[in-house]
Image (spheres, grey):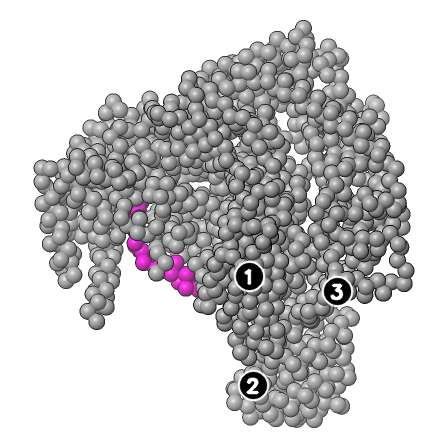
């Protein structure tokens, strides 16, 4: 008894202290004493006071520790303020720190007394030790006392030009504190921000951008001059700063650059042009080029410099880069973020939650991005419900014709989940898949109908609701299902479900003219025992039948109406009266009864089954507002792309401006290139705060040199004398073709190639004219970057290694290839997996129809044939395209023996495409399929671009229609195409299964004949 | 950014609060308690809760809710990631992060939090720097402090914050110079009813414990770096070097840290090292069900599977289970319906099995779904993906360090559907 009393009073005490804090922020020391409970506290505080006033440091420290403990627990320790503040100048560091902690907490409430401490900080601000200066500034600015605003302002200004970057960083932090204390100081603070933005230290960058975001996020003009510097520093800024900078740069880029998203349209338009064009139209073409989209080099710089950050260990940084790519990158490039986002799913629950939300939004708009990672979103039974539903949402978004059967099978497992809330969500998801993918609508419906006999109320109710919606969207030929549901009415007890079925029968009573009156008859019998919800629907059904089929149902309806008239629920009595007046003609009936039929049987709009994430995309991804789906305070709208890009020269720093003048003299055609070069050069340099200015001027002068060179090469009209083109003839041809098709799109790529070509020329041909220049640039970079001393050497060595090893591989494969070619049709020994003795004719196993799939939903315990996972997967690859015949493009394929991800009948084939040339191959895709009748093929997504010596593996699905016929198609690159074909060895068409002997015999009996070989394994 | 932080224990008491800006009354947590009540389990409390004037972002770890109060738009992951970093730091400082530990060390906790955020913006989050600012409490130091009256706060201000390598403290000295690397791989998998793999992925990390004098510069190379599909690095790793040569080159932080985490590309098929044979059936008519599971090794490359632990969440209708294991111990909690079976090592000659009957609630219908089996196991000296460290070199210092590499494979989220 006494125990409970004590705890109660303690609670009361806490509540009281809260009250004291809230109501009287500047409580006088005596105020808490007014509350009875504090009497004991004051006594305790007395001895604390004594300890604080003692001469021994240990006593003081002890007291301070106890006080901090009080603060941590949320108890009021404000009355000790005078005693504590005296110790602000203590020599003992720990006492001092704890006093700081105390000051920051209570200074706001005890402003006058807090002033006592100010002079100590002012003195410390002049300390020779930078760390003491910094911490003094930190505490001084954290004391929220309006009187000292001028002192703070002065301190910030001084600190902003401190020699130590650490002090400057703290100054940047102090800006925000001062701004929140006194917004009047905004103008002065902006000046300081402007100054600090120019700072070249990585320490300062993050903090000052934070201050910028807080104080003056609309002053985009302050960023212009610092844009390139921020981009280049980004990698070396600490992780929290990176997040803030990336978010700010995203907003900046959306106001300064034109949209890269029209890319595709431009391409089309242009290639069309190309077709009709003759030689003389060269000039016109040049003009056209100017109209097409060219990515601003600064825009490209941002994308390039943020990409490595996808590898950060900090989830917030990865998410920030992902949203930057989503909002800024050309659509074709945004795909690179998906892998990193999927990686984050292995992180903590909270991180998963946020990331999944963002993926959900992304997956609505661009399915392709996450399609390859479909299986990463499969739900585990141990996931928390919120994660489960989000994963389900994404799976539903990703569903398409190819993967729907796999997904539905997965959903089957979910429906049976013990987590009923999740099971219900799954049913909703099935409903959405059914409406989106018309091919499976019927199967889904059947499956859902089976679910109606589930024992769980939520599941049944949800299925009925979803079926109702589905039928409403396409009521044309579902008489059967309605009949089936009518039959179910006898067994189903869940009111919601019963009501929904009755509504359906009423709504479509004309389609089931024989059943509907019977249902009404049955329900009329049980009317009195029904739930209110069901009663209303019975009335509804009666009314509708009365209007359409009054001959049979007139009496029944009147009977029901009479029952309703005397019902206990006023709602039902009300409805009865209303319906009676409306449908039964009598002398008093008003004008409305004429329209009764129109009122009851009006065409009702079908409910839309949409993703709840559909409307989230107007919020910037990765923001709090996006997570909440409502505008959070302080949310900054992401502006639309400008139609015309604002003047890009505003971003030029003085040195770069010099370079610009040079181009002006040398000719307009190459206007963008110098700047691009300039940055690709300077990117290699590690931006260290000390050497930045020096290196910048270096690269500046370099860019000038380049300008000259490029100008001259242009004048000589692309002859072989130009340094880049002579060094690598292939890049030459590449470039010219690129020009032909679309210079706009290929701009950046060809830049890259040039860069590489230059690198090669630098290493291979020392006598080349371009060599001196590139070598010098390399020297530059190695100067500023200690680690890259031996970089170029080791790199070249490495590449040599790589090529040689590649050759070995190739010869190996070549040797293998002939073996493979003469595969016999029944060469089963080779392909039969070791541990799976039974092979069953494919037709029976490979194509379990979807209906059968979903029949499983009914929870019947029928024996199913289990498909065994492949235990041994052949490493043998087959050649698809030799590199000689493919002009450097080589392709190999092998059968992965994984369950086809593209569909049941599809055999999955992994194609490895290798680029053996030394330039990029772009847009590798499949065209002109020549397939025998019945055969189908799921192509891989086009490969945007393949780096030299790079290889990429894609998977495609081919339905060989259980035959060993060849699948021929063309493998196309951007400017070439090669005829190739895939012929499946028979073994690859089969699926290993395990089954008992009895089952096998049964199956065998079903087949009239079976080839001897196939039973061999048994 | 972050206004305040509240620490709430399982029973809903706020046992610590810290404010970086003006004080936010703890009554703001009422919204959190409301949400907690709505969500049946702690796991289901939404990480972001809007209130009229504030937003509450929380993480749940070690049975403690860390609730951050923010007032305006901020990337939610920023706050969540920071909170996790706070928990990691506490764990680093005190060994365990529990309510008791935090309450005992409230002053150190407060000092650490003070250094980690300035005005709500992260300031020093590297544990190397923090440990220089505020020394972690050890028994020895506590004894020494009480006698000599010295403090936990470093008397020298750290210089690491100012240097080019902010993650490493300066002036490190060891008599035994050693560097250990643990390659730990986790298999996440979902196994079908029939034993076929629905999805399987390998996630790996390399955790390091480096105790080297001075400023060593290490390079670590792999035999088969191509295996690494997607990687994320500790900030100390030089990204450019990795891009060009696939070599990890770094100046390590002092002590324990996670060097790298990686994902093995999905194209390589994952070898599943264990299999589970199961026969679980509930019958409609009788109130007894059958339960039988056997665990066996599959593709273990000749290594022993140890630390095997099987857990399974039984359906609500299950009243009790009478089981006999062939080895290990098992517990069935009739309240939470959680069955756990601590198997231990798997002997391939005599496979461990758990057999018996399940008694169901009389009269209740049989459960819809068979329970999912969660599996934990460990395999020492094996990285299941086949990743191998080639060599570790040290530059910049004269002495010869002792080097060690350890491999281990563990089950991550390993589920068998039955």
Distance between mark 1 and mark 3 Cα atoms = 34 Å
> Which picture quadrant has residue A241?
top left
Q: Does the magenta segment cover residue B383?
A: no
Callout 3 crowding tier (Cα within 10 Å): few <14, some 14–19, many ≥20: few
Towards the viewer: A634 or B329 = B329
Q: Mark 1 points at which residue?
A: B354
**Label 1 vs label 2, nearer the camera:** 1
Secondary structure of the residue carrying tag 1 is strand
Instruction: Determine if residue A534 is in view.
Output: yes
Residues at circles 1 and 2 in contact by the CB criterion of under 8 Å: no
Q: Is residue A360 above or below residue A56?
A: below
Secondary structure of the residue carrying tag 2 is helix
Q: Which residue is drawn at 54% across and 73% down?
A: B360
Q: Does the magenta segment cover residue B19?
A: yes
Asked if badges 1 and 2 are on one and the same chain, I answer no
Q: Which residue is drawn at 85% across and 39% down?
A: A981
> Which picture quadrant has residue A180?
top left
Q: Which residue is drawn at 71% across and 14% down?
A: A727
Output the chain of dot 1.
Answer: B
Q: Is residue A1010 above or below residue B22?
A: below
Residue furthest front in the image: B349
Q: Give the range drawn in magenta.
A: B12-38
Q: Mark 2 points at which residue?
A: A572
Output the chain of dot 2.
Answer: A
Quarter holding the N terminus of chain A? bottom left
Residues at circles 3 and 2 in contact by the CB criterion of under 8 Å: no
**Label 1 vs label 3, nearer the camera:** 1
Asked if badges 3 and 2 are on one and the same chain, I answer yes
């Amino acid at each position: 008894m006494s125990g409970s009393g004590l705890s109660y009073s303690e609670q009361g005490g806490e509540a009281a202290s809260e009250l004291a804090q809230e109501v009287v922020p500047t409580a006088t020391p005596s105020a808490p004493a007014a509350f009875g409970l504090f009497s004991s506290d004051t006594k305790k505080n007395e001895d604390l006071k004594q300890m604080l006033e003692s001469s021994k440091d240990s006593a003081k420290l002890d007291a301070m520790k106890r006080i901090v403990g009080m603060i941590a627990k949320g108890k009021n320790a404000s009355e000790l303020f005078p005693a504590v503040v005296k110790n602000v100048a203590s020599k003992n560091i720990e006492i001092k720190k704890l006093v700081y902690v105390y000051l920051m907490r209570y200074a706001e409430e005890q402003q006058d007394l807090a002033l006592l401490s100010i002079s100590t900080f002012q003195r410390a601000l002049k300390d020779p030790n930078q760390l003491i200066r910094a911490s003094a500034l930190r505490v001084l600015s954290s004391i929220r006392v309006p009187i000292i605003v001028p002192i703070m302002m002065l301190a910030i200004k001084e600190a902003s030009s401190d020699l130590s970057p650490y002090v400057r960083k703290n100054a940047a932090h102090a800006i925000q504190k001062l701004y929140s204390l006194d917004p009047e100081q905004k103008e002065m603070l902006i000046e300081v921000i402007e100054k600090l933005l120019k700072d070249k230290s990585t320490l300062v960058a993050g903090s000052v951008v934070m201050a910028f975001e807080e104080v003056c996020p609309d002053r985009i003009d302050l960023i212009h001059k610092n844009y390139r510097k921020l981009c280049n520093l980004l990698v070396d800024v600490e992780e929290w700063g990176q997040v803030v900078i990336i978010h700010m740069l995203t907003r900046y880029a959306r106001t300064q650059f034109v949209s890269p998203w029209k890319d595709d349209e431009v391409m089309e338009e242009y290639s069309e042009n190309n077709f009709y064009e003759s030689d003389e139209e060269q000039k016109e073409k040049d003009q056209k080029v100017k109209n097409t989209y060219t990515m601003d080099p600064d825009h490209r710089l941002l994308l390039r410099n943020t990409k490595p950050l996808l590898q950060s260990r900090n989830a917030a940084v990865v998410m920030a880069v992902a949203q930057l790519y989503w909002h800024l990158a050309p659509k074709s490039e945004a795909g690179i973020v998906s892998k990193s986002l999927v990686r984050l799913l292995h992180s903590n629950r909270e991180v998963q939650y946020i990331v999944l939300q963002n993926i959900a939004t992304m997956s609505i708009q661009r399915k392709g991005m996450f399609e390859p990672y479909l299986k990463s979103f499969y739900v585990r039974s141990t996931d928390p419900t919120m994660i489960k539903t989000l994963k389900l949402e994404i799976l539903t978004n990703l569903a398409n014709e190819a993967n729907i059967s796999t997904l539905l099978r997965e959903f089957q497992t979910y429906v049976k989940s013990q987590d009923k809330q999740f099971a219900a969500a799954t049913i909703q998801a099935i409903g959405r898949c059914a409406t989106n993918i018309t091919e499976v609508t019927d199967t889904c419906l059947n499956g859902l109908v089976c679910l109606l006999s589930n024992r769980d109320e939520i599941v049944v109710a949800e299925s009925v609701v979803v079926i109702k919606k589905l039928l409403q969207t396409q009521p044309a030929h579902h008489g059967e299902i309605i009949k089936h549901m009518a039959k179910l009415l006898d067994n189903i007890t869940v009111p919601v479900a019963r009501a929904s079925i009755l509504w359906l029968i009423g709504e479509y009573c004309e389609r089931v003219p024989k059943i509907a009156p019977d249902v009404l008859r049955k329900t009329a019998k049980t009317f009195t025992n029904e739930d209110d919800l069901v009663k209303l629907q019975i009335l509804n059904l009666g009314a509708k039948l009365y209007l359409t089929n009054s001959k049979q149902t007139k009496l029944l309806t009147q009977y029901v109406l009479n029952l309703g008239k005397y019902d206990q629920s006023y709602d039902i009595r009300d409805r009865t009266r209303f319906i009676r007046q409306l449908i039964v003609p009598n002398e008093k009936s008003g004008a409305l009864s004429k329209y009764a039929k129109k009122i009851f049987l009006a065409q009702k709009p079908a409910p839309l089954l949409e993703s709840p994430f559909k409307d989230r995309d107007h919020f910037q991804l990765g923001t709090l507002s996006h997570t909440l789906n409502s505008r959070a305070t302080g949310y900054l709208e992401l502006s639309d792309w400008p139609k015309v890009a604002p003047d890009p020269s505003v971003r030029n720093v003085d040195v770069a401006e010099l370079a610009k003048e040079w181009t002006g003299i040398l000719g307009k055609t190459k206007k963008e290139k110098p700047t691009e070069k300039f940055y690709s050069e300077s990117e290699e340099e590690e931006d260290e705060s000390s050497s930045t200015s020096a290196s910048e001027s270096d690269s500046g002068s370099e860019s000038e040199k380049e300008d000259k060179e490029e100008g001259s090469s242009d004048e000589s009209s692309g002859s072989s004398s130009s340094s880049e083109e002579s060094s690598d003839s292939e890049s030459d041809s590449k470039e010219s073709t690129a020009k032909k098709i679309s210079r706009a799109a290929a701009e950046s790529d060809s830049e890259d190639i040039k860069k590489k070509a230059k690198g090669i020329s630098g290493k291979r041909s020392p006598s080349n004219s371009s060599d001196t220049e590139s070598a010098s640039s390399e020297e530059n970079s190695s100067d500023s970057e200690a680690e890259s001393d031996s970089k170029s050497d080791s790199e070249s060595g490495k590449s040599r290694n790589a090529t040689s090893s590649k050759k070995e591989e190739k010869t190996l494969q070549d040797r293998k290839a002939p073996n493979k070619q003469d595969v016999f049709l029944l060469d089963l020994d080779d392909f039969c997996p070791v541990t799976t003795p039974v092979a069953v004719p494919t037709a029976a196993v490979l194509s379990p129809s979807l209906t059968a799939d979903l029949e499983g939903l009914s929870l019947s315990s029928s024996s199913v044939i289990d498909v065994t996972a492949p235990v041994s997967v052949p490493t043998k690859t087959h050649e698809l395209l030799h590199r000689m015949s493919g002009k450097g493009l080589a392709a190999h394929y092998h059968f992965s023996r994984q369950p086809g991800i593209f569909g049941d009948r599809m055999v999955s084939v992994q194609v490895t495409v290798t680029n053996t040339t030394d330039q990029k191959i772009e847009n590798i895709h499949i065209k002109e399929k020549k397939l025998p009748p019945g055969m189908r093929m799921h192509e891989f997504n086009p490969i945007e671009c393949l780096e030299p010596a790079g290889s990429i593996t894609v998977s495609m699905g081919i339905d060989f229609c259980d035959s060993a016929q060849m699948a021929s198609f063309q493998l196309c690159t951007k400017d070439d195409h090669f005829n190739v074909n895939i012929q499946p060895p028979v073994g690859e068409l089969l699926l290993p299964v395990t089954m008992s002997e009895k089952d096998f015999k049964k199956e065998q009996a079903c087949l009239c004949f079976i080839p001897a070989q196939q039973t061999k394994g048994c | 950014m972050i206004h305040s932080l509240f620490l709430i224990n399982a029973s809903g008491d706020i046992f610590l609060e810290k404010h970086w800006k003006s004080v936010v009354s703890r009554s703001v947590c009422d919204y959190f308690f409301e949400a907690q009540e709505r969500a049946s389990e702690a796991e289901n409390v939404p990480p972001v809760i809007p209130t009229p004037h504030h937003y509450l972002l929380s993480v749940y770890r070690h049975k403690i809710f860390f609730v951050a109060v923010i007032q305006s738009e901020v990337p939610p992951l920023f706050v969540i990631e920071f909170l996790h970093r706070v928990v990691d730091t506490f764990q680093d400082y005190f060994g365990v992060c529990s309510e008791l530990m935090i309450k005992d060390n409230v002053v150190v906790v407060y000092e650490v939090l003070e250094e980690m955020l300035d005005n709500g913006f992260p300031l020093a989050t590297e544990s190397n720097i923090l440990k220089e600012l505020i020394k972690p409490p050890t028994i020895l130091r506590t004894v020494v402090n009480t006698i000599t009256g010295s403090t936990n706060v470093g008397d020298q201000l750290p210089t690491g914050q100012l240097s080019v390598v902010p993650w490493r403290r300066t002036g490190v000295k060891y008599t035994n110079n050693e560097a250990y690397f643990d390659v730990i791989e986790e298999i996440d998998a979902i196994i079908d009813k029939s034993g076929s793999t629905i999805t399987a992925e390998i996630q790996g990390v390399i955790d390091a414990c480096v105790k080297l004098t001075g400023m060593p510069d290490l390079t670590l190379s792999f035999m088969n770096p191509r295996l690494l599909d997607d990687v994320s690095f500790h900030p100390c790793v030089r990204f450019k070097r990795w891009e060009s040569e696939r070599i990890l080159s770094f100046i390590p932080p002092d002590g324990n840290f996670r060097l790298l985490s990686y994902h093995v590309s999905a194209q390589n098929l994952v070898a599943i090292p264990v299999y589970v044979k199961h026969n679980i059936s509930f019958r409609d008519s009788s109130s007894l069900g059958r339960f039988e599971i056997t665990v066996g090794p599959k593709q273990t490359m000749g290594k022993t599977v140890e630390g095997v632990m099987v857990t399974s969440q039984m359906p609500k209708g299950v009243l009790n289970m009478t089981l006999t294991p062939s080895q290990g111990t098992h517990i069935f909690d009739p309240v939470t319906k959680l069955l756990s079976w601590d198997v231990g090592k798997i002997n391939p000659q005599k496979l461990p099995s758990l057999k018996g009957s399940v008694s169901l609630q009389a009269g209740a219908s049989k459960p819809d779904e068979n329970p999912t089996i969660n599996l934990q196991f460990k395999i020492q000296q094996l990285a299941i993906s086949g990743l191998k460290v080639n060599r570790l070199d040290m530059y910049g210092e004269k002495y010869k360090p002792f080097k060690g590499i350890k491999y281990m494979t563990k089950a991550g989220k390993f589920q068998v559907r039955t």
